[in-house]
Image: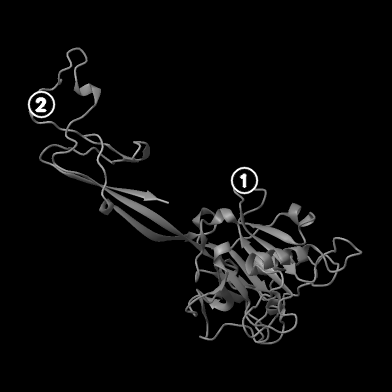
Amino acid sequence: MAFKRLDPEDFIVSSDSVTSTVWSNNSPSLNTYFSSSTQKEGTSGPYYLSVYQTASNSDSAAVQFQIAYANKNGGGGVNFDSSVPFVSPTTTIYGQYRTLVLEDENAKFTFGPTFTGSGADNDFYVISIERARYKQSLLPGSLNLILSSSNEDENPLRLTDDSNQVTLPTFYGTMRAYQLISGSNGSSYDGGDGFTTNSGSYGLVLPDISTILLNASALNDNSSGGGGINLQTNSGSDTFGDNPTKLYDHISGSFSVIPLANPTTSNIFELNSQETLTSDYVFIRARNSEYNYTENPSFISGSTGEVIYPYFINNPQTFPTTVGLYNDSNDLLAVAKLSRPIQKDFTKEALVRVKLDF
């Protein structure tokens, strides 16, 4: 017997969620940050900045995430055409994320239901995790990002998503969105909403596109107890705002008016990814009367055509090492290798479970 048709009950489908860190070398947190001076001095530097885990000219350097600044009115950027005001690279970035996230060029970003007034959605920062760092999406509740403050009386700001505080996320189309709040591991510190006093939430976390939008108004707040870090975003018209560098300095801890007691733990960026693996299990059953004879040429004498080992005539045995899965046209679709041969004869049955991951 060479082929055996499988029954429907021989197939089982299973899904498992696998999590891992997004940073290089499987590090659970990122606490060293480097940028490229060449990029900073180039035309894209004032608007878009790549962040590495080591010096950018090192052989082991790899982009971990990018920082960008978006402004609906073109603020913080030099106009493409001096005769056309309020249209700069920051406008383009704003439009890109409005189309990607909101899927409507007339829609507005909402950073918490309490912040919808004039100027509420004018500008934001973007942290985009490098695509090579994750497989499917970010893991809600794993985000911990610490930003140093420009205010002498304010401690560093720790941000996370609110995934542990909501029953369901907000959806933009099929895309999940969580509010970015003050707290850790998906929850606020005090059991409240984790929003700022004056500017709503700190932004949005979009795990399905590995993107974090940071509310510029919330970060710019310099009022006592307001929850901001006095980021001092330059949103002036027709100017090089160099805003991505401002946020980079607060992420890396290189800008801090308060000496940090433990800098290596005070500027951490923790984030995990998740992936759903769909597995097909195929159960291959060889009953006692099946697969006991071999077609291996070494079993038969080439000169006489007789079985070389007479013992196998009355007591045939085989030692399967491979399972092949075929379609109805006898095309080989998949091959499974056993870790060791299985002895098979009329007194033994075999059950092999083949796992196919997608």
Q: Which residue corresponds to the image point at 58% horizontal and 62% vertical from the top-left? A: 209
- Label 2 sits on a secondary structure element that is helix
Percent coordinates x, y for residue 86 in the rendering:
84, 69
Relative to 277, say whether 337 is above or below: above
10 Å crowding of disc 2: few (<14), some (14-19), many (20+)? few
- Label 1 sits on a secondary structure element that is loop
Amino acid type, callout 1: Asp
Give the image quarter of residue 1: top left
Using residue 295 as the reference point, say whether residue 121 is left or right of it.
Answer: right
> Which label number is shown at residue 94?
none
Residue holding disc 1? 59
Relative to 75, say whether 284 is above or below: above
Q: Nearer the viewer, residue 95 or 220?
A: 95
> Which label number is shown at residue 313?
2
Percent coordinates x, y for residue 75 in the rendering:
80, 70
Give the image quarter of residue 143: bottom right
In this view, which residue lies farthest toward the front? 329
Rounded to the nearest angstrom, the CA distance separating label 2 from label 1 is 63 Å
Relative to 302, say whether 101 is above or below: below
Q: Nearer the viewer, residue 292 or 267?
A: 292
The reply to whether residue 166 is in sight is: yes
Whether label 2 touches label 1, CB < 8 Å: no
Q: Nearer the viewer, residue 269 or 304?
A: 304
In this view, which residue lies farthest toward the right? 83
Pointer 2 or 1: first along the chain: 1
Using residue 286 as the reference point, say whether residue 157 is left or right of it.
Answer: right
